[in-house]
């Protein structure tokens, strides 16, 4: 994405777009981009290991929100998710603990190629919960 002018323009367009949403946005530089280890030895989605940085959005939903407010927050979160998906496509991947809980294809989005291996571990060591 960073190597071409089109990619950089897409990133800037995405950042401009998400600033229009009623959400807090931050861009931490915490990925293992320079790490030379084997991505198969961790549980995170493989895309994480080739990411230079990631963006995160926070949508507040106070405990006493009305149904309409909760629905608005969910719609905002869904639209933010769609915006990042349009930028990264299937090659991207959210960090599971900071992702949209209403993600449709959560197995692929959160775990990618690691899902089946992780499910085997779960079945072996925690079959009841």
Image (cartoon, rainbow, N blue to C red):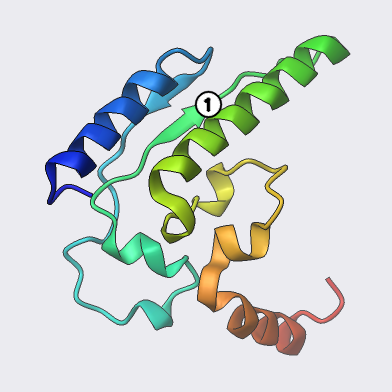
In the picture, residue 54 is in which quadrant? Answer: top left
* Number of marks in the rendered image: 1
Locate residue 71, reporting x and y percent: 78, 20
Frontmost residue, 51 versus 11: 11
Relative horizontal placement of residue 23, taking residue 26 as reference (left or right): right
Q: How many residues crowd mark 1 within 10 Å: few (<14), some (14–19), many (20+)?
A: some
Q: Residue at x 50, y 50 (%)?
A: 94
Vertical arrangement, residue 24 with respect to residue 124, above or below = above
Locate residue 123, reporting x and y percent: 76, 85
In which quadrant is the C terminus drawn? bottom right
Q: Is residue 65 visible?
A: no
Q: Is residue 125 visible?
A: yes
The residue labelled by disc 1 is 58
Relative horizontal placement of residue 31, taking residue 111 as reference (left or right): left
Relative horizontal placement of residue 65, taking residue 47 as reference (left or right): right
Frontmost residue, 78 versus 67: 78
Locate residue 27, reporting x and y percent: 32, 34
Q: Secondary structure at mark 1?
A: strand
Locate residue 8, reporting x and y percent: 19, 38
Q: Residue at x 46, y 41 (%)?
A: 86
In the picture, residue 11 is in which quadrant? Answer: top left
Frontmost residue, 50 versus 65: 50
Relative horizontal placement of residue 10, taking residue 107 as reference (left or right): left
Vertical arrangement, residue 51 with respect to residue 57, above or below = below
Q: Residue at x 13, y 47 (%)?
A: 4
Vertical arrangement, residue 18 with respect to residue 34, above or below = above
Frontmost residue, 36 versus 68: 68
């Amino acid at each position: 994405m960073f190597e071409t002018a089109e990619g950089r323009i897409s990133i800037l367009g995405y950042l401009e777009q998400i600033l229009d949403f009623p959400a807090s946005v931050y861009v931490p530089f915490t990925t293992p981009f320079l790490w030379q280890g084997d991505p198969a030895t961790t549980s995170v989605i493989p895309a994480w290991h080739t990411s230079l940085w990631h963006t995160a959005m926070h949508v507040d939903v106070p405990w006493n929100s009305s149904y309409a407010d909760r629905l608005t927050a969910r719609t905002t979160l869904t639209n933010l998710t769609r915006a990042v998906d349009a930028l990264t496509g299937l090659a991207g991947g959210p960090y599971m603990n900071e992702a949209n809980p209403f993600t449709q294809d959560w197995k692929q989005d959160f775990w990618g190629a690691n899902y089946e291996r992780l499910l085997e571990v779960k079945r072996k060591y925690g079959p009841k919960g």
